Amino acid sequence: MRSLLTSLAVAALACAGASCTGNTVGDRTAAAEPSSQTSTQIFSVKGVIRELKPDGRTVVIKHEEIPNYMPAMTMPLEVKDTNELAGVRPGDEVAFRMLVTGKEGWIDQIRKLGSTDAAEPPPRETFRRVRIVEPLEVGDTLPDYPFTNELGQAIHLAQFKGQALGLTFIYTRCPLPNFCPRMSSHFADACKKLSTLSDGPKNWHLLSISFDPEFDTPGVLKNYAKRYERDTNHWSFATGALIDIDAITEQFGLMFPREGKGFTFNHNLRTVVADAQGRVRKVFIGNDWKVDDLVAEMVAAAEAN
């Protein structure tokens, strides 16, 4: 295992994926509109464009509070029609609709209202202690970080050696179904499929690690876990010391910088499979991976010698 040195580093790193930032923009005029589909919530929202992603369908918007749904945040939002983003650029003030179902969220009807200073710097937090760590690649040994599970029990990653281990990173207050809720739903589906495979392996475990330890206590995680049908012998939720959470997430390229205080995360998504020898086998980036792909990797990882 590579040595881990303790140093000081800035908490607010560059945002590289799904994000949540508690900064209010403009007047609080967002309100839910009637929906023709009872399964879809529709909100009218205003915000400021911060970034257009290279994929042509994702835009990072610093938006106002959406009453009865989510606080003001900065987050990447997807469009289904790429023409929605034609003619807009960072710094533009926009109005748009946000549509949310049980499985996904997206925006449309984007209208430019004006422009602001696109170079406005985000608020920054002070320093916190983190470890200097090196990236983990496929074939590397998973470090033995300590955590606390949803039952309040001390656990550590090395205890899962001999089992295929699936890791994902969440926080329970993540609002949009595309992000943390999708990771948890995918794990629920994977847990069910792995448990019911004929002649499937028995030596496997899923672990959802929260990067919001201040809020996601073992009790909060235990209540959160009740939302999902799961085999408690094969799927756990965990929290821990921020210095350890910082280290393992950074090693897999996941970032969750805070901007200001309170409910202020920017984050991207990573899901990891380690084999029965404790070696990294697969790193899934983002939220587009399929449950069957995770199940196949877990089965192969369980058989690793």
Image (spheres, rainbow, N blue to C red):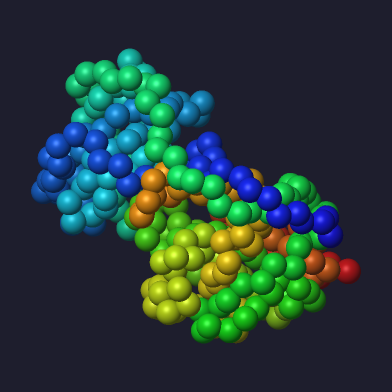
Q: Residue furthest right?
A: 305
Q: Is residue 271 above or below residue 30?
A: below
Whether residue 109 appears in this view of the structure is no
Residue 255: x percent and y percent? 56, 47
With 91 as the anchor, is 44 left or right in this view?
left
Left or right: where 186 falls relative to 270: left
Residue at the top extreme, as displayed: 87
Residue occupying image coordinates x 54% and y 47%: 127
The C terminus - image quarter = bottom right
Establish if 9 lies above or below 52.
Answer: below
Q: Quadrant of residue 301?
A: bottom right
Give how far across and how far down residue 67 sits, in percent.
Answer: 17, 51
Q: Is residue 62 above or below residue 192?
A: above
| Camera-nearest residue between 130 and 39 | 130
Q: Quadrant of the N terminus?
A: bottom right
Q: Looking at the image, which residue is at 58% across and 84% down? A: 153
Residue 155 drawn at (x, y percent): 65, 78
Of 83 and 142, the residue lying toward us:
142
Q: Is residue 142 left or right of residue 226?
A: right
Identify the residue at image location x=65%, y=65%. 166
Q: How many marks do you count on the picture? A: 0
Q: Based on the displayed image, in which of its 4 quarters is residue 225 positioned?
A: bottom left
Q: At x 79% / y 70%, what residue is drawn? A: 276
Residue 305 in view: yes
Query: Vertical placement of 274 versus 149: above or below?
Result: above
Q: Name the foreground residue: 277 vs 264.
A: 264
Relative depth, front residue between 135 and 106: 135
Residue 88 in picture, x, y percent from top left: 33, 19
Left or right of 72, for residue 10 = right
